[in-house]
Amino acid sequence: MLFWLGFYLFFFLLSTYIGYQKGNLVAGILLGYVLGPVGVICMYFSKDRKHMICQHCHSSIHIQSYFCPQCKTKQLYVA
Ligand SMILES: [Zn+2]
C-alpha cells in the first residue's frame, strides 16, 4: 500500500515538475493527479510554452530571449 502511494506521489511530482518547466503548471498538476504515470507521458509530449528551438543551432532556448545564448544569433519569435 505504502509502495503504491509513493509510486503514485512520485509520478504526481514528476508531472508537476514537467508542467512547471514547460510553463504549464496547472496542466501538470491535473494530469499527474488524475492520470499518474500516463499524465507524466502526456506532459512530456505536450507543447513547451516556455522554450523554443533556435533557428540556427537548434538548441532549446527561452521563448523571450532575443539572442541565442549558444550561438549568439538574433531570434525571431514565430508563434
Ligand atoms: Zn542558437
Image: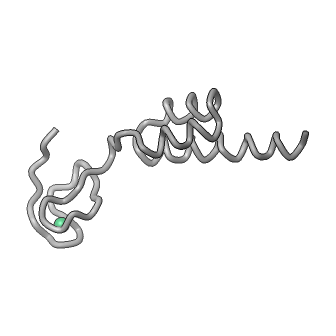
Direction from residue 74 to residue 12 in the image, left or right: right
Farthest right residue? 1
Farthest bottom residue? 71
Q: Tag count in the figure?
A: 0
Quadrant housing the C terminus: top left
Direction from residue 13 to residue 60 in the image, left or right: left
Residue drawn at the location 52% of the way across and 36% of the way down: 28
Q: Is residue 67 above or below residue 64?
A: below
Query: Which quadrant of the frame does ligand 1 lie within?
Result: bottom left
Direction from residue 5 to residue 68 in the image, left or right: left
Direction from residue 22 to residue 73 in the image, left or right: left
Residue drawn at the location 65% of the way across and 36% of the way down: 36
- Could you tell me residue 19's position as x and y percent? 48, 41
Residue drawn at the location 49% of the way across and 38% of the way down: 42
- Could you tell me residue 57's position as x and y percent? 18, 68
**78 and 41: which one is in front?**
41
**38 and 9: which one is in front?**
38
Quadrant housing the N terminus: top right
* Quarter location, residue 62: bottom left
- Could you tell me residue 32's position as x and y percent? 60, 35
